[in-house]
Structure formats: structure tokens, C-alpha cells
Amino acid sequence: MKKRVLITIFCILLLNFAFGQTEVKSDSKLNYELIVILDTIHTNDQKYREKMDEIAEKYGLQSNEMKEIWNTMHVTDSINLIKVKKIIDENGWLGSDVIGEQGNKTLFLVIQHSDLNTQITYLPILREAVKKNNAKASHLALLEDRTALSHGKKQVYGSQIGQDQKTGEYYIFPIEDPDNVDKRRAEVGLEPISEYLKTWNLKWDVKKHKAIIKETEKNKKTP
């Protein structure tokens, strides 16, 4: 008799656990289909960019090998953009609660790597997504910087780095109010600019940066 009671209790607990698990899954907002799609897009977005430094160092920035990877990357970016635009246009800028952290980052990366008109189109959408906690303020900061430079303005957060096509050396694009750049970076969750620049073996020298900006602006005024 005791055995029957124990078996019955065990079965009840097992059923409760099973139904409980099902309920958790049904409550989840994660869209696994989109997560898989965006995971593939993320891989395709990064794989050529990860090879560029190695190819540039081995063959040179102006080499045929470098031109080939640039062309392949641009074609891949175009394909990725079609897919990401469709996702955003149909669903809005989805948060990590729906497409995961990497999926959310992938939406940003593909728009960041797109043409200027596309960046301008989706910039206000990303701004709204940040307000709704569906996107990171740090991602918005990078897109704000890129579009500002494309319009001939200074960047605000110092996120955009250029590379001299002849020497291969990296440099920082002009920053608005460079004295307070770290304050602005902290507000959007970005690390101090001195740490950020280590990726390109650059050192942050605010006085030098202001001097370069002053000289550049002076040259622009010279007929």
C-alpha cells in the first residue's frame, strides 16, 4: 500500500514538473527561428573582417588579395542587409529578450556596415529602441559617430578610427569637445578612450588631438 502511495505521489510530482517546464517555455519571448538566422548573419558579417588585418599585413593594403576580400565582404554585407532590413521592417528593432544578445548586436552591426542612406533611415529607429531598452546606448553612439563623420561633422564619442592607405597606420577621426569625451563615453556604457584605442596600438593625447584638429581646420580655410 505504501509503495502505491509513493508511486502515485512521484507521478504527480513528475507531471507537475513536466507541465511546469512546458509553461516556462511557452512564456519565453525568444524567437529561435530569428536567433538562428541572425547567428548565421553575424558569422558572415565578421568572418571577412577578421581576416583583413592578416591579409593587409601579408600582401599589403593595395594588393589584389585585399581588393578581393573587400569585394567579397561588400557582397556579403548587401545580402545581410536585405535580411536584417526585412526583420526590422516587419518586427521593429527587437530586443535581446526576443533574439538574444548576439542577435540584437547583429542588427546593429549590419546597419553600421551599410551605406549612409540606410544608416540615416534606421538611426531614428535605433534611437527609439534604446529608449525602450531594446538596444544598447553604446551601439547607438557608434552609429551616431559614423553618420556624423559622413556628414562632415566631428564624432562625439571617439569610436571611429581611420587607416592611412599608404602607411597602414591608424588614426582617430576628429572628436567634438575632446576634453569631455570620456564623460560622454561613460554615459553610454563605453570604456575610456585610452583603453579603447589600445586595440589599434594608439595612445590618447588630448592636447595632440586638439592641435591636429586646429591644424586641419586651418588648412580647410586656406584657399
Image (cartoon, rainbow, N blue to C red):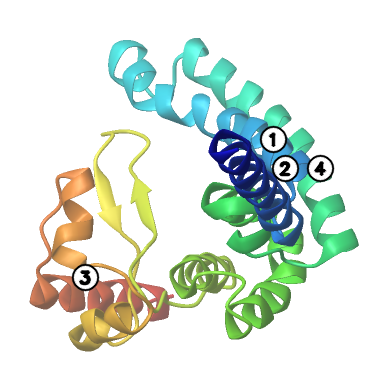
Tell us which disc is closer to us: 1 or 2.
Answer: 2
Q: Which residue is mark 2?
A: 32
Tell us which disc is closer to us: 3 or 1.
Answer: 1
Q: Nearer the viewer, residue 175 or 190?
A: 190
**Marks 3 and 1, how far apart in space?**
45 Å
Q: Which residue is mark 1?
A: 36
Q: In the rendered view, would you say 145 is above or below 3? A: below
Amino acid type assigned to the residue bearing label 3 in the image: Ile
Q: Quadrant of residue 59?
A: top left
Per the image, label 1 sits on a secondary structure element best described as helix
Q: Which residue is mark 4?
A: 83
Amino acid type assigned to the residue bearing label 2 in the image: Tyr
Q: Are marks 4 and 3 in contact (CB under 8 Å)?
A: no
Per the image, label 3 sits on a secondary structure element best described as helix
Horizontally, is 203 left or right of 187 in the view?
Answer: left
Amino acid type assigned to the residue bearing label 4 in the image: Lys
Sequence-wise, which precedes: disc 1 or disc 4? 1
Tell us which disc is closer to us: 1 or 4.
Answer: 1
**Residue 119 % position (x, y):** 68, 63
The quarter of the rendered structure image containing the C terminus is bottom left
**Marks 1 and 4, how far apart in space?**
13 Å
The quarter of the rendered structure image containing the N terminus is top right
Q: Are marks 3 and 2 in contact (CB under 8 Å)?
A: no
Horizontally, is 109 left or right of 86 in the view?
Answer: left
Q: Are marks 3 and 1 in contact (CB under 8 Å)?
A: no
**Marks 1 and 2, how far apart in space?**
6 Å
**Residue 104 % position (x, y):** 60, 56
Q: Nearer the viewer, residue 161 or 168?
A: 161
Q: Are marks 1 and 4 in contact (CB under 8 Å)?
A: no
